[in-house]
Image: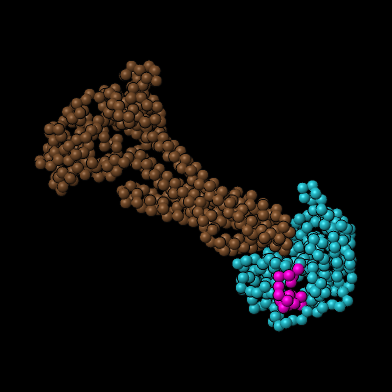
Chain colours: A brown, B cyan
Amino acid sequence: MIISWIKNIKQVYTAILSRKARSFLTVLGIVIGVAGVIIILSLGAGAQSLVLSQITKLGTNLIGVLPGKSNETGPPAQAFGIQVTTLIQEDVVAMQDKTRFPHITDIAGFVTGPATIIWRNQNIDTNFVGTQAAYPKIQDVEVAEGRFFDEREELGSNVIVLGFDIKQELFGETDAIGEVVKIKNVPLQVVGVMARQGTVAFQNQDDQVFMPLNIGQQQLLGIKYIQFIRGKVDSSDNVDSTIYEVETILRERHHISDPENDDFSVRDLASAVDTLSAITDSLKLFLVVMAGISLVVGGIGIMNIMLVTVAERTREIGLRKAVGATNKQIRNQFLIESGALTLSGGVIGVLIGVVISYLAAIGARLAGFDWDFVVTPLSIILAIGVSILTGVVFGLYPAFKAAKLNPIEALRYE
Amino acid sequence: MSLIEIKNLTKDYVNEDVVTPVLKGIDFKIEAGEFVAIMGPSGSGKSTLMHILGFLDRPSSGKYLFQGKDTTEFDDQMLAEIRNESIGFVFQAFNLLARTSVLENVKLPLVYSKRENHDAMATKALEGVGLGHRLNFFTNQISGGEKQRVAIARALVNEPKVIFADEPTGNLDSKSGNTVMKILQDLNDQGKTIILVTHEMDTAEHAKRLIRIKDGQIILDEKIKQRKLAKDQGELIK
């Protein structure tokens, strides 16, 4: 049995290799389809791991409160450029109540905006973050020089902490601590420089400056509301209960009885991760379906060429039957032939797909992304399995046609 | 027990409800070791008869006993097995595989058999027809006469009981045809049963027994009195 299969496969490859150009063109559809599947799965996995690692860098036990209502998975209202003014600093104060929120270890309100920072005759365009003393603990970041502003200063002292890049650009190697910079003519004394952080959540964390919330709110933006709140929960197990508590107190404070009318939304990063995974998974599925369609088209090409092959080799089929081949052996010969064709296509496709995915990963790394080159063995097995399956499925009809040929007519066939 | 025994064999072709009888009740026996020529004009049914005898086709009615066994009820699998183990075909048009070496062509029946040592067996068969020096030639690199000898080697490689030769000299010049007939006569001398189908008296006279068919019936079945003996004209290098 095994020997006869080996014999079959040997014959088949002789048959395929004797028509190299045609065989290659025939499997081109499969090659493209399989390469597509590999590239999509690899880039999808790379992008997903990039996004997820960016997010989990922030920590999964963070919660965020955004103004305006949004449903669980949809984008926040701010994403549409709407400024909602319902969150205020007193909401943050309420959440600092340890008896009511025992699991919130740190919490801070935020405002952000663009700023031009001036020191002596230099100026740099950057972004400022108005926040509170708890910021380094919430974001899990370190101060490299000096210190972050404290709880007393956060009430309205004119102090500023510089991001690493800003300090470098503005001061170079000179000591910045104690110097006074200006933003919109507001003088601010440098008390600290943040440690280098790199890019988190697609944002260069070193290209920003930090100041007390009140300064940013009132002196720079001239607003009374805050843009968002971030808090750290002691353990990710307590995130859900804390979110519930936060929602309850905000409804109390904002006099909302029906959750439908919420003017805020509370999110945690775990759910954001789930949402993102769901989006990328469905995108991946869609692309894989597209690649699957190209495999089906490739399969039809295989069926077509196998029918031509069977017709061309009618005399050979007749001869094989005359020397003792059974219908089953003829059928298997052509099934193996189309399976071997698509298997070769699949292997070539996997190689092309892996090379392109690898080049894309190198490109992404050169562009500064922390991109992982991911080709799972599963995707390779899947791609090759699917290509063999395509060959066998689309080879069935031609193979049965060959098996059913009448040997006498086949021998006489001109 | 005869090697081949057919009793009242008929074959009808049905085409769009029109029944055309091709064989109308044929009876004969062929013993092992015979050299029989089946002769008749085209359309006489001689090819159909050979296809049935060679298990490429089935009779419409009648009995076909091969080595004493009634084969009329055999399924496709069993017929394929008989064709593989007991029968060798030589066709007018050679029917060799293109773009394939002489040796691979001769090995083809072995692919479907349980035998081993394919290369050795195929080489031996080719040496038997004087083509030991052509093993790795491709089929498009050899002459017509050599092609037919490759076909004979292919028919012999499984050591069958019977060789069916359907107009084996039809596509050959007289010299090559003579060589082919010489090989067939030698094989018969070594004990192989040969059944030759032809429409040429000249070719048929190389056999020992002549069966003439006309309109699907046997009109003559006799021993050949003056048998022609083919001479090797230097083509067979031993």
Q: Relative to the observer, which residue lies in front, B219 or A17?
A: B219
Q: Where does the C terminus of chain A fall, quadrant-wise?
A: bottom right
Question: Along the line of sight, which residue is nearer the eye, A146 or A382?
Answer: A382
Which sits in the foreground, B130 or A34?
B130
User: Bounds of the magenta span?
Assistant: B167-182
Q: Residue at x 82, y 50 (%)?
A: B19
Q: Measured from the top left, where is residue A351 in percent x and y?
A: 46, 56
B171 inside magenta stretch: yes
Where does the image place residue B2, in percent across and percent down from the top left? 88, 66
Q: Is residue B183 left or right of residue A259?
A: right
Residue A213 quadrant: top left
> In the rendered image, is residue A263 in sight?
yes
The N terminus of chain A sits in image quarter: bottom right
Q: Is residue A96 visible?
A: no
Residue A92 at what x, y percent from top left?
28, 26
- Does the stretch in magenta take in B51? no
In this rendering, would A392 be left or right of A209?
right
Measured as percent of width and height from the top left, residue B33 is found at 84, 72
Is A179 positioned to the left or the right of A401 in the image? Answer: left
**Which residue is pictured at 51% across the width and 51% down the height?**
A29
User: Residue A209 occupies which quadrant of the picture?
Assistant: top left
Query: Is residue A62 found left or right of A188 in the rendered image?
Result: right
Location of residue A241 (image quadrant) = top left
